[in-house]
């Protein structure tokens, strides 16, 4: 079925194959639409909208949250079309992935979270849910026109130009031990009055053993027009270390060395990476004081 709004035609496929066939038919003149809230911000900036909008809202299999086995592992599955609010408030996500719930609470206002979806947040590559998902080693499930495939979100984001041709169907969160570590943080620094992108969005999970030695570290930074990425050099530096002044100094320097966000009209690259380094050093010193 299709209806015409303004000068775009809206298609409402009811399954993945139909959605894919429409995309193949209209290619660059088309776009998938989930909640439409990110696309709206693009069109408001004057970016032209395509003449064919392929709405995913009638594809029932894209919605919902459940626990299931994927490739022999117990996982939390989140359908791509699940609304941000439904995700953030879902009891299983709050229990098994509190970092994601906390991150979602910091996206826009409730009205936008009632329309925007987790799949849309991930698919445009800049969403504030991504740092929390990367910290949790999330995978994405996507339809390539023939079959459903899974890939680590981290890798999928790196090949995003290619992925514009894929249809995201869900997010998989492995039920791993580190989702229960108490040293988790999600920090978003930004202006709240409009959607101008955050200055930085930083997420982390760090654990220490009984001797106070760090035995696990996952750190992710993004924000603005920067696709979130893991800070692997800094993670490596932390492993097998005790938190002390010298380590914190080295962490600060390493973050400045490995994180290279873009500048925009509001914030420079240098400001963004210093804010990121400050947040992480402050979380680490809090963890150090707790020992
Ligand atoms: C006032 C306002 C404030 C906002 N604040 C924030 C904020 O603080 N943080 C933040 O992260 N975002 C913010 N946003 C942007 C947006 O609301 C979220 O990123 C939201 O999660 C996008 O989801 P959506 O379903 O609306 O995506 P859509 O706009 O429908 O789609 C986004 C992109 O993803 C593609 N897409 C969508 N679903 C799929 C799929 N299943 N498979 C493949 N491609 C797909 C679309 O083609 C499009 O390119 C804001 C928006 C507004 C209007």
Image (cartoon, rainbow, N blue to C red):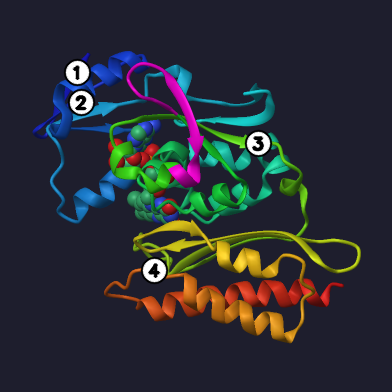
Nearest to N terminus: mark 4 or mark 1: 1
Mark 4 lies on residue: 261
Judge from the rendering whether residue 118 lies leftward or rightward of residue 15; answer left or right.
Answer: right
Q: Nearer the viewer, mark 3 or mark 2?
A: 3
Query: 128 or 143: which is nearer to us?
Result: 143
* Residues at marks 3 and 2, CA–CA distance in whole angstroms: 36 Å
Residue contact between numbered discs 2 and 1, judged by CB atoms under 8 Å:
yes
What residue sits 50% from the left and 49% below the top? Answer: 129
Residue contact between numbered discs 1 and 3, judged by CB atoms under 8 Å:
no
The local secondary structure at tag 1 comes to strand
- Which region is colored magenta? 142-155
Label 1 lies in ligand 1 vicinity (Cβ under 8 Å)? no
Identify the mark at residue 2; answer none if there is no mark: 1
Is residue 221 visible in this depiction of the protein? yes
Q: Position of residue 209 (x, y in %)?
A: 86, 61
Mark 3 lies on residue: 174
Mark 2 lies on residue: 10
Nearest to N terminus: mark 3 or mark 2: 2
């Amino acid at each position: 079925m299709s209806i015409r709004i303004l000068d775009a035609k809206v298609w409402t496929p009811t399954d993945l194959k139909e959605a894919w066939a429409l995309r193949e038919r209209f290619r660059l003149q088309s776009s998938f639409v989930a909640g439409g809230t990110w696309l709206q911000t693009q069109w408001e900036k004057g970016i032209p909208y395509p003449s064919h909008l392929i709405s995913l809202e009638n594809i029932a299999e894209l919605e919902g949250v459940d626990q299931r086995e994927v490739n022999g592992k117990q996982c939390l599955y989140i359908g791509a079309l699940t609304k941000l609010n439904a995700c953030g408030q879902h009891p299983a996500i709050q229990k098994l992935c509190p970092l994601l719930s906390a991150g979602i609470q910091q996206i826009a206002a409730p009205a936008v979270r009632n329309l925007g979806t987790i799949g849309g947040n991930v698919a445009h590559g800049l969403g504030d849910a991504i740092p929390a998902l990367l910290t949790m080693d999330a995978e994405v499930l996507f339809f390539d026109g023939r079959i459903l495939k899974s890939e680590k979100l981290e890798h999928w984001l790196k090949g995003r130009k290619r992925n514009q041709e894929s249809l995201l169907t869900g997010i998989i969160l492995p039920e791993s031990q580190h989702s229960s570590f108490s040293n988790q943080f999600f920090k978003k620094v930004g202006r709240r009055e409009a959607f101008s992108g955050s200055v930085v969005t930083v997420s982390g999970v760090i654990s220490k053993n009984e001797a106070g030695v760090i035995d696990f570290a996952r750190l992710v930074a993004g924000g603005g027009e920067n696709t979130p990425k893991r800070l692997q050099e800094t993670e490596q530096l932390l492993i097998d270390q005790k938190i002390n002044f010298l380590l914190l100094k080295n962490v600060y320097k390493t973050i400045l060395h490995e994180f290279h966000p873009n500048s925009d009209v509001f914030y420079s690259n240098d400001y963004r990476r210093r804010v990121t380094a400050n947040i992480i050093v402050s979380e680490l010193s809090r963890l150090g004081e707790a020992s």
